[in-house]
Image (tube, grey):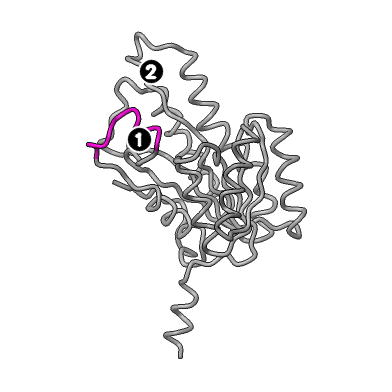
Amino acid sequence: MSALIGAAALTPRFDGQLVVVTGVGRAGQVGEAVAREFGRLGANVAVIDRDTALAEERAAALHSEGLTATADGCDLTDFVATERLFTRLAGAHGGNLYALANVAGGFAMSGSVADSDPNVLQKMLAINLLSSYSATRAALPYLRAAHGAVVYVASAAVLPGGSGANMSAYAMSKAGVVALMRAVAEEESANGVRANAIAPTSIRTSANIATMGTGVRYVEREAVGAMITFLCSKAAANVSGQVIALA
């Protein structure tokens, strides 16, 4: 009997819990798969994208699969709008937020540092780092209430042995995401909030396939979803402050 109880405790489930996934817009991208996996595990998934119409399309697709999802459009670099959104979402769930998956972001080559365009750096910092910072800051009061978890998407480029050559802007933004994660993990431990990051190589998304083709060793979107849901679940109750490589 005790073995069965232990197994049940390690089953990642989010029944009836509010989970927020950012960057759930275009079909065929990572956010869609992460939101779907949370939904299959019983979560009430709030999907957020800068483009409201795209977020609504993804939520409708989840509904068609029998999953529970709501959609909101928000520029996550707008700190005031982000706070208002998270206050409303958590308020509808008793002030609790069980998990935040910071999937919003993007990639761009910036060329060598000597020849790089500072505007590319600003864009990478905004969509990868500031969006994660803003969402985390807005979510933390409600994650504390639920003793919840937050997961970030970094990159293999910032791991030991990784290369940021010709994409320093992207690598810098993702290194910042790791630094943010570690700060949250340390600061929020006493409040019962865990923080971790995944660091994948290229993920099999529609955008990556269009750019790089099919002859690339990809990380599957479903693998990303499985790892993020695991890290947000009670099965990973003793895991915090970690960067998990996916290759």
Residue type at tag 2: Ser
Q: In which quarter of the image is residue 7?
A: bottom left
Tag 2 residue = 110
Q: Quadrant of residue 94?
A: bottom right
Which one is earlier in the sequence, the residue at label 2 or at label 1?
2
Mark 2 vs mark 1: give the one in front: 2
- The x and y percentages for residue 151 are 50, 49
Q: Which residue is drawn at 61% across and 46% down?
A: 47
Please name whichever residue, 218 or 91, is drawn nearer the observer in this view of the structure. Answer: 218
Q: Residues within 10 Å of mark 1 (few under 14, many from 20)?
A: many
Please name whichever residue, 148 or 184, is drawn nearer the observer in this view of the structure. Answer: 148
227 horizontally vs 80: left or right? left
Q: Which residue is drawn at 51% across and 51% down?
A: 195
Magenta stretch? Answer: 206-216
Tag 1 residue = 158
Magenta segment includes 212: yes
Quarter that holds the N terminus: bottom left
Magenta segment includes 157: no
Q: Which residue lies furthest to the bottom in this view?
A: 1
Whole-number angstrom distance, CA of label 2 to CA of label 1:
16 Å
Residue type at tag 1: Val
- The x and y percentages for residue 13 are 53, 67
The secondary structure type at the circle numbered 1 is helix
Please name whichever residue, 52 or 236, is drawn nearer the observer in this view of the structure. Answer: 52
Q: Residue at x 56, y 49 (%)?
A: 61
Q: Residue furthest top?
A: 115
Dominant SS in magenta = helix
Say whether marks 2 and 1 touch (CB < 8 Å).
no
The secondary structure type at the circle numbered 2 is loop
Vertical order, 238 against 225 (above or below):
below
46 horizontally vs 81: left or right? left
